[in-house]
Image (spheres, rainbow, N blue to C red):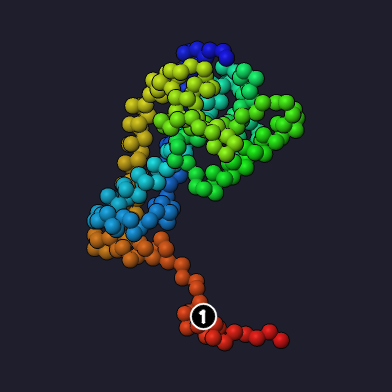
Amino acid sequence: MNNISVEELNQFVNTNIDKFHQSKAKSLQQLGLKMILARKNPYLFKAKNLHTASDLIKDIMDAFLSSSEEKLFGDFLEELAIFISSKTCNGQKSAATGIDLEFTNKGINYLVSIKSGTSWGNSTQQKKQEENFQTAVRVKKQLDRTMNVQPVLGICYGKTKTSFLRGYMKVVGQSFWHLISDNPNFYTDIIEPLGYRAKEHNEAFLAEKGRIINIFTQEFINDFCDDGEINWKKLVEFNSGNLDTPEVEKVDEEIKNPIKSD
């Protein structure tokens, strides 16, 4: 493998971490009060004993933004891994379904699906990932039966040891970054550049977040409060009111007296 210079790493991270922060700000600006109220669990927030509109809005926004931020940063880490591999072993973004990165090292053709952390996907999604690995390997083997192909689930952070599961290799944290860089310390080398202009970006984000919380709080008070008190019934009706099932009596009657076909 080739070495990647500190300058190359810093330049890539500095440019793309800016894009991450810009995406965060854009996701914040695209929010609407009704949109976040419709997507979050009102029963949970009632159980947390929230009494003020501002606290409720802040909690809902924090829950919404947390999942959005994890997705955005996961996309950044995927791009970083592909960039590193392109410099160290001519790796490239894969066109295969469910595969993010392909590279060859020491005669092994690696097919890598990149995930942020170990807690990813439900059982259906994990099964689909296995199928994607199987399909990608089969296509490679059709091109060259002698090719040594290794599917890899590469996870960017965590302490889980490397393991082989149902036809693919799972590498986590330090081991993943080592695999694509051939540097056992690379997982710590990348942490410093990630802080590029972090304070500046965070202050701007928090200022905009505060502005939107104030706007949403005022809107929430107008629409979901009675004399300053949260109307939880009205909030739940907005979030979940969709009754479109037939009346129980009608269902019972149809069960007892089914319509006979001619």
Amino acid type, callout 1 = Val
The front one of 24 and 155 is 155
Identify which residue is drawn at 49% across, 26% down: 176
User: Where 4 sits versus 205, above or below?
Assistant: above
SS category of the residue bearing label 1: helix
Residue 108, x across and y down, in percent: 63, 23
Residue 247: percent from the left, percent from the top? 48, 79
Badge 1, how many Cα within 10 Å: few under 14, some, many 20+? few
Of 129 and 233, the residue lying toward us: 129
Q: Quadrant of the N terminus?
A: top right
Which residue is painted at 31% across and 55% down in the image?
45
Residue 241 in sight: yes
In the displayed structure, 6 sits above or below 76; it is: above
Give residue 199's position: percent from left, percent from top: 33, 27
Q: Give 43 or 235, whichever is nearer the viewer.
A: 43
In the depicted structure, whether residue 56 falls above or below residue 259: above
- Looking at the image, residue 240 sits to the left or right of residue 154; the answer is left
* Residue at 50% across, 12% down: 5
Instruction: State the image quarter where residue 27 is shown.
Output: top left
Identify the residue under disc 1.
Answer: 251
The answer to whether one can see residue 18 in this image is no
